[in-house]
Amino acid sequence: MKKRFRGINSNLVHVGERPDPVTGSVIPPIYQTTTFAFETNEGMLDLMEGRAEGYIYTRYGNPNYTMVEEKLAFLEGAEKGLVLSSGMAATSVAIMAIVKSGEHIISHPDIYGGSFGLFDDVFPRLGITTTFVDPGDFSQLESAVRKNTRVIFLETPSNPTLRIYDIKKIAGFAHESGIKLIIDNTFATPFNQKPLDLGADVVVHSCTKYLNGHSDIMAGAILGEADYIDICINIFRKMGGNLNGFDAWLLLRGLKTFGLRMKRHNENAQAVAEFLDNHSLVENVYYPGLPSHPQHSLAKEQMSAFGGVLSFELKGDVKQVNHILNRVKLFTRAVSLGSVESLITQPVAAVHYNVPRELRLRGGISDKLVRVSVGIEEAEDIIEDLAQALD
Ligand SMILES: Cc1ncc(COP(=O)(O)O)c(C=O)c1O
């Protein structure tokens, strides 16, 4: 690994990168292979028994993964990282490395709908149950803890309501009860928030979003202490869910511009949030960078900037949502977030479709809510598009 530099962008360009040892190619080759050859049969056994380092089979590891894992571990300040085929693969493995059948998780309703589905539908089949609370209310957290609670799983800012949960305080609470805190840092990204520095035990990512940033690959990552990541590696090798060489290579490339893109996402989203906040047809804007956000001061404490996603509700009835979504021109009507292009969606129509209405409303996810992922286009163009749709 190359020496670490002072600035994030220098490190994003250089950490985990090395010229190809065979040809000197500055950009690493794509190791689009399933299997790796050995000079001798003894060499294979040396690798299997840990006496030699290397690669044997891509589900077990691939040089393109190693490079990405180094960069991501550096970004989150983690001892070790693991890349997987998607954010959901990362969340599943990260939890299964801690929680067994008969044990319990605490989470909240305003998380990604896919994570909700994993906790609500899949984990119960394995004997793992989840209680959904408001983690901003400590009495709810306290009363949710059971003897068999192993994990608190949080998204902050939450999805799609952009609520902020106090990582340091919740980590302290979790650790007093012997519970691990896992943070899905997809929305905030390590550019804006470092959960491990704030006391969280594990960070998971959908690298499909900002870390890659171009809406062209699915990937996920788990970051944490080396011993814990080794447990994750053991589980994931047996369950599958690995990335492939080309997608890891694309992620490595996307990461080089991650810092530049995030700066722009942050600035654009702040401008869009301020525009919406001052618009007479807009009832509520949810963006932690607005002084009117209920946890703005907490957001300023634990985040260095506030990310590229925001939500809003219009005055009037739910029909207004279709009106806006059908009239935008620069925005693309699509789920997902964190890419260079601006995307707009109604969470209850897709991303949070599977969350029961009563629970959704408890998490602040109303039918009128519109979620926007602000891209890196010119802020004036993004605002002009929303303005013409609102007119
Ligand atoms: C916050 C968050 N976490 C996790 C995921 C799941 O990631 P993936 O789609 O890469 O499996 C998503 C997907 O939208 C997300 O928004």
Image (spheres, rainbow, N blue to C red):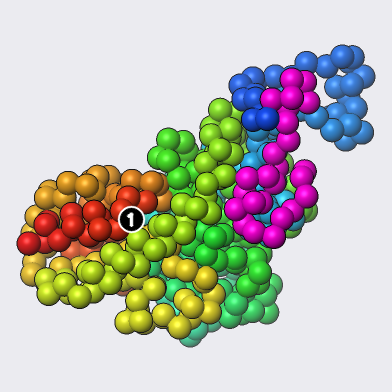
* Vertical placement of residue 226 versus 139, above or below: above
Q: Position of residue 329 (x, y in %)?
A: 17, 46
382 or 327: nearer the viewer: 382
The boundaries of the magenta stretch are 1-25
* Vertical placement of residue 343 versus 248, above or below: below
Residue at position x 45%, y 79% in the image: 136
Residue at position x 58%, y 80% in the image: 169
Q: Does 12 appear in magenta?
A: yes
Label 1 sits on residue: 374
Q: Is residue 378 left or right of residue 136?
A: left
Residue at position x 78%, y 50% in the image: 3
Q: Position of residue 89 (x, y in %)?
A: 53, 43
Q: Quadrant of residue 228?
A: bottom right
Q: Is most of the magenta stretch helix, strand or loop?
A: loop
98 or 128: nearer the viewer: 98
Residue at position x 63%, y 72% in the image: 198
Q: Quadrant of residue 248?
A: top right
